[in-house]
Image (cartoon, rainbow, N blue to C red):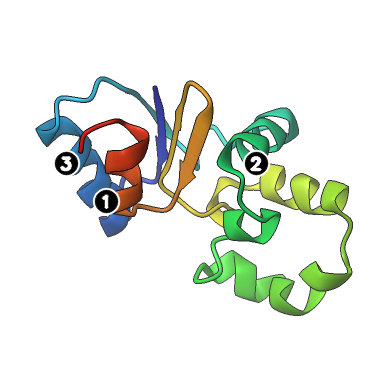
Amino acid sequence: MLFVCYPKCTTCQKAKKWLEEKGVTFEERHIKEKNPSIEEIKDWHKRSGLPLKKFFNTSGLLYRELKLKEKLPNMSEEEQYEILASDGMIVKRPILIGDGFALVGFNEARWKTALGLE
């Protein structure tokens, strides 16, 4: 499993601790040092079943600086993928990618279900 995170993010820290406590084996990837490619984002988007807008870190500084709240509704999916791949800090995190799923943001109940830990 791949755990994509920003180590300074408290939600990412909480999710990592939760995974470790549950004994889940994962590879950790620092989203700012190695931001996702367009292909990865497309794959994660497909696996997640979520609307693409859920992949944006709406509380991030860059999101506000780029005025994405106003721009996103008029952008094509391809343009949104390009923006998400341009800087890891625009992407909502943490993301947990496993066989057939991608979980965006930490929600303990959803993660438990996806990992079969119920």
- For image coordinates 29% across by 56% down, the residue present is 11
Q: Secondary structure at mark 1?
A: helix
Sequence order check, earlier mark of 2 and 3 = 3
| First reached walking from the N terminus: tag 2 or tag 1 | 2
How packed mark 2 is, by other alpha carbons closer than 10 Å (few <14, some 14-19, many 20 or more), is many
Q: How many marks?
A: 3
Cα–Cα gap, marks 2 and 1: 20 Å
User: Does dot 2 land on a helix, a strand or a loop?
Assistant: helix
**Residue topped by disc 3:** 17
Residue receiving disc 1: 108
Locate residue 112, reporting x and y percent. 27, 41
Q: Amino acid at mark 1?
A: Glu
* Residue 43 higher or lower than 32, as above or below: above
Q: Which residue is mark 2?
A: 45
Q: Is residue 43 visible?
A: yes
Residue 33 visible to the viewer: no
Q: Say which element carries label 3.
A: helix
Quarter of the image with the C terminus in it: top left
